[in-house]
Amino acid sequence: MRITMIGSGYVGLVSGACFSDFGHQVTCVDKDEGKIESLRAGRMPIFEPGLAQLVASNVAAGRLTFTTNLAEGVAQADAVFIAVGTPSRRGDGHADLSYVFAATREIAEAATRPLVVVTKSTVPVGTGDRVETLLRETRGDIAFSVVSNPEFLREGAAIADFKRPDRIVIGSEESSDGERAREVMREIYRPLYLNESPILFTGRRTAELTKYAANAFLATKITFINEVADLCEAVGADVKDVARGIGLDNRIGRKFLHAGPGYGGSCFPKDTLALLKTAEDFESPVRIVEAVVQVNDNRKRAMGRKVLKALGHGEDGGDSRGKTVALLGLTFKPNTDDMRDAPSLAIAMALTDAGVHVRAYDPEGMAAAEALLPGLVCCADAYEAAAGADAVAIVTEWDVFRALDLDRLAKAMARPVLVDLRNIYHRADVESAGFTYVAIGR
């Protein structure tokens, strides 16, 4: 199949590379000339394990190309995927669909024959209807079929998620155009279908809502266990054991039950907010999600206060001003360079506001962090960051932080205090190295 991917960001690039690896002919389109030139040169605009090699092999095989010319990409395509950004709109929190609709109009103007247009971007319910209307208004002489095909990719594991998905959701309307679209989508995903990956065909609005509902539910699990962690600290329980105790129940499951500093990234914050706005528009409130958003926002700043408390701030008039904290991990999760809504941002600002000097190390997020946190001192590794520090806080659970030389770390510090916001260490191991150990919900 000939596939054109509009947008070469995270979703578009990963999806396009994986489709080409299945044997399809894929053209990735982006307006950013610098990004396209970099991709042609083999330089990735994002960090995702395995992506550079996947792109290089399929470019070499002639199945994957990059262009700024949308008309060139659309002219001979069997299906065009819209994979542009839908950030939260300033002022009201609604998803900004301007990039989606701009791409839609350009697709219509460039189309030369009947075409399946697939919305891969995360969009509110009813967006597919508006896309279909725009296509027909712009080019009434061409038959368009509009499909919703939401992505379910985890940053850091996106290629595995695409090639071995839990499910593939395809939403289309019950019509002759819809049936034609389903046939094209079956052919596109045939390699996965033959591998017995579940494919769920639904209505278009159902597919759109499924994406938001999935992310809101996962965000709820994270927020739930974080609140349970606070309760564990109050009553003297261990949240890791509580999480295991409930997670072994198959009805609940163990995933996303890891207490920490709150969720961040490009999806959960944006998508939970967009779901709230959709619910508000349709006068069908989702109170649980409202609470999730509020609790998560408050939690990030609270983690900054937790680090300050470990410094002795506020105890017997203690002041943390002038002290130094080393933050280990800045990105919102490991195996990505994504700093969007990362808990580290709120934690660093809370520390800075209290007069604390912040040093940091992250394997991939340093450049993005420096742009977001002016004055941040970035270091070459964890030990350099800890040198002379009054406390070390593990914010992101990169593998490189799981086997630190604790004796070396303690000797480098002014005061050996370890605040483990991801619960990756055992208390006995840390305390045996001379540390004061502070964890989450333990």
Image (cartoon, grey):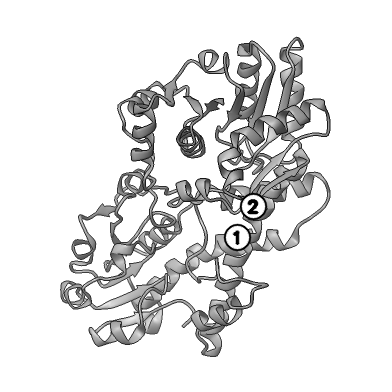
Please say whether residue 198 is visible from this viewpoint.
yes
Indicate the position of residue 396 as horizontal and vertical percent values: 39, 62
State left or right for residue 65 relative to residue 216: left
Horizontally, is 191 left or right of 62 in the view? right
Is residue 326 visible in the rendered structure shown here? no
Amino acid type for the residue under numbered disc 2: Thr
Nearer to the camera, 119 or 363? 119
Q: Residue at x 64, y 52 (%)?
A: 272
Work out whether mark 2 precedes mark 1 in sequence or the reverse, and give the earlier one.
Answer: 1
399 is higher (above) or lower (below) than 9: below
Type of amino acid at the residue the image marks with label 1: Ala
Nearest to the observer: residue 394 or residue 176: 176
Q: Which residue is mark 2?
A: 272
User: Relative to 221, is 317 on the left or the right?
Assistant: left
Residue on which disc 1 sits: 219
Dots 2 and 1: beta carbons under 8 Å?
yes
Task: From the viewer's side, name the closer residue of 10 and 324.
Answer: 10
**How far apart are the two marked residues, 2 and 1, measured between alpha carbons?**
8 Å
Residue 299's tag is none
319 is higher (above) or lower (below) than 157: below
Which residue does the image show at 51% across and 83% down from the upper left? Answer: 241
Residue at 76% from the left image edge and 15% from the top image edge: 137
Q: How many marks?
A: 2
Location of the N terminus by quadrant is: top right
